[in-house]
Image (cartoon, rainbow, N blue to C red):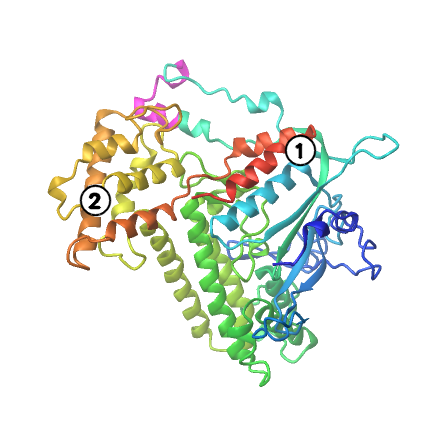
Amino acid sequence: KLLLSESDVNSEEFARFFSGDVNAVEEGLIPTWATPYALSIMGNRYTSNCPYGTGDGYGDGRAMSIGEMLIPTKTNPNNENDDSTTTSAASERYELQLKGAGPTPFCRGADGRAVLRSSIREFLASEAMHHLGISTTRALSLVVSENSPSGSPRNTSRRPWYSESNKEQKIPSMNDPRLMLYPKEKRIQIIEAMKTQKRDPDTMIEEPNAITTRVASSFVRIGHLDLFARRATSFLGGGGKVLDQYQKGTSSWEELEEMIWHAAYREFRTEAYDPYRATNDIASAGRALLTGTLDKLSLMTAQWIRVGFCQGNFNADNCLVAGRTMDYGPFGFMDKYDPLFAKWTGSGEHYGFLNQPMAGLANYKILVESVMPVVTDDVAEWQRYVDAAQTMFRSRVGEALREKMGFELEDATHSEGLFESLEPLLKLNGGVDWTLFWRQLYRITVKYPLPSSSKTEDYESMFQLLSDEETNRDGSSPFYEPLTSDVRQQYIDWITSWRVALIKSTTEKQNGTGNANELITERMRLSNPKYILREWMLVDAYTQAAEGDEAMIHDLLTLVESPY
C-alpha cells in the first residue's frame, strides 16, 4: 500500500530514516511531532498522572510521528497506456510513527526508548492481528541497535524484569498440610488461583534497544478528543460533564471543534466530513463520527474475544477513534481459558479478557461526553448514544461467539444459551485451551456433516475428536487434565445441544441441509484460528534475537500470515 519497492526497504536511507535519522531524506530535516492527550480509565477522567496536575500535559513518552504519505492514484484510471499519477486531498493517507526512537516531551523522566523484547512483540502481534482479520496498526519496520564501530557496548536500556526466583512459583500440592483444612473443591480453587496469580518484576536487567515503525491512516485517540474537551471547560482538567462548564466561543472551544473535524476527516471522511464540512455542520459531523466509532470499536473488541486476545491496558488514550488495535504493550493471546485473563498486574479485572467490550464501552462514553457538547445541549440525546452503545457492544460479542459455533451472525434464536452453558464447563478439570477447543470443534463439522435429523448423530465419537482421543498426540487435546466421567458427559451433552441447534437452524431456513454444512464449516474455520502468537513463541523469538539470531522472527511472521 505504501508503494515501497524491495530496493527502497533495503537501502541505507530507509534504515537511517526509520531508525530516527530524519536528515536521511533528500529534502533534509523533516519536522516530527508528538501530541498530548488525556487519560481516562473505565470512564473516569484522571489528572494525577499529568506533571502539571491538570490533565493537560500527558502524552506518549516514546512514540513520535515522522511524516505522512499520500498514495498517488492514476490520473486516468481508464487509460491503460497512461501511467501518470497524481495526489489530492482524496488520496489515501498514512501516518508513520516511530516507537522507541528517543524522548518526547511526555517522557516524564524516562528515556523514550523501547527494548528489543517489546519491539519484537509489537511487530509480530500487529501483523498477526492484521492477518486474523482484525483492524490494527501495522508494522513497517524493526530496527535494532547494534555495536558501534569502536566496539563500545551495545545501545541498551535498563528495564524491570523477573528474577529466576520470581519465575519459580511455589505451588502447593493437594496434600499440602496448609490446605488440608479445606474441602477438595476449595483446595483445587486455591491452587488454580495461585497458578494464575500475577507477579510484579523484581529486578533490573540490561536489554538491547530497538525501534518499531507503525503505520495507520491516523493515530487519533479518544484521549485526544478527551483532552480538548477538558480544555473547553471552565475548570482545566474538569470532567466536562456539566453543560454550563463549557466556555463556548473561546479559543479552546474552537480547538475542540477543529479536533472533531480532524478526526472526522482522517477516519470517517466519506460519512462524517465530506457531506458537512462545506456548510460547517459540525453537529451532523459529530453524530456521524460517534456512529462510525461505535461500529468499529464494538466490532474490534468482539473480535478480540473471538481470537483470545487481551490488550491489557485499554484506557481511552490507548483507544483509537477508528476502532483500530494499537499499543501492543502488556498484551497476550490466551492459552488456558480464563474470563479475567490478562498479562499485566495492572490490568485488573476491568481489563480482563471477557471484560474488554465493557472497557471499550467506557472509552466510548468518554468520546460521547467529549463530542456531544458541540452537537447539542440535549443531555437526553447524549444518553441515547450511550444506551445504544451498550446494546451494540453486547450484540457484537454475541455475533462473534455465534460464528465460532457455526451459526449465522443474526441467528440469536437457535444459538441462545449455548455459550452460557459452555462457559462454566471450560473452567472445570484444569480448564481448556481456548484456541485448541474451538479449532477442534470446527474439525467436528468437517468429519461429521450435518444430517437431516439429529437421531443419526454419534456424539460420543464427536467428543473423542474434540478431545483428540483418536490420535492421543502430546499437546493436541484442548483439555489440560484428563476429564472426570461426569465432566466428560457434560461436554457430550453440550455437543448434543449444539448439533441439534445447528440442524434446526439450517432445516428451518431451507429444505434439508443442502450445502449448509459447507457454509458452517467455512464459517467456523474462518472464526477459529489454527495459529496464534503464544507467549512461549514470542519469548523464544526475542531471546534468540537478543543473541543475534533473527530466524524465529521470520518464521513466526510467516506463520501468522496464514492463521486459519
Magenta residue check for 178: yes
Crowd band around label 1 with a 10 angstrom C-alpha radius: few (<14), some (14–19), many (20+): few
Is residue 1 shown in magenta? no
- Sequence-first tag of 1 and 2: 1
Q: Amino acid at mark 2?
A: Arg
Quadrant in which residue 545 is drawn: top right
Point out which mark residue 356 bears: none
Q: Quadrant of residue 246?
A: bottom right
Q: Main secondary structure of the magenta part?
A: helix
Please report the residue visible at 80 percent of the width from the left and 33 percent of the height from the top.
147
Determine whether the residue tagged by mark 2 lies in a helix, strand or loop.
helix
Dot 2 corresponds to which residue? 499
Say what amino acid the circle numbered 1 marks: Pro
Q: Position of residue 502 (x, y in %)?
A: 22, 49
Q: Which of the pair 551/259 is nearer the observer?
A: 551
> Is 84 left, or right, of 513 in this rendering?
right
Please state which of residues 322 and 176 is positioned toward the viewer in this rendering: 322
The image quadrant where one finds the C terminus is top left
Read off the magenta span.
Answer: 176-190
Q: Is residue 447 left or right of residue 83?
A: left
Q: Residue furthest bottom?
A: 279
> Vertically, is 21 above or below 370?
above
Q: Nearer the viewer, residue 228 or 511?
A: 511
The residue labelled by disc 1 is 160
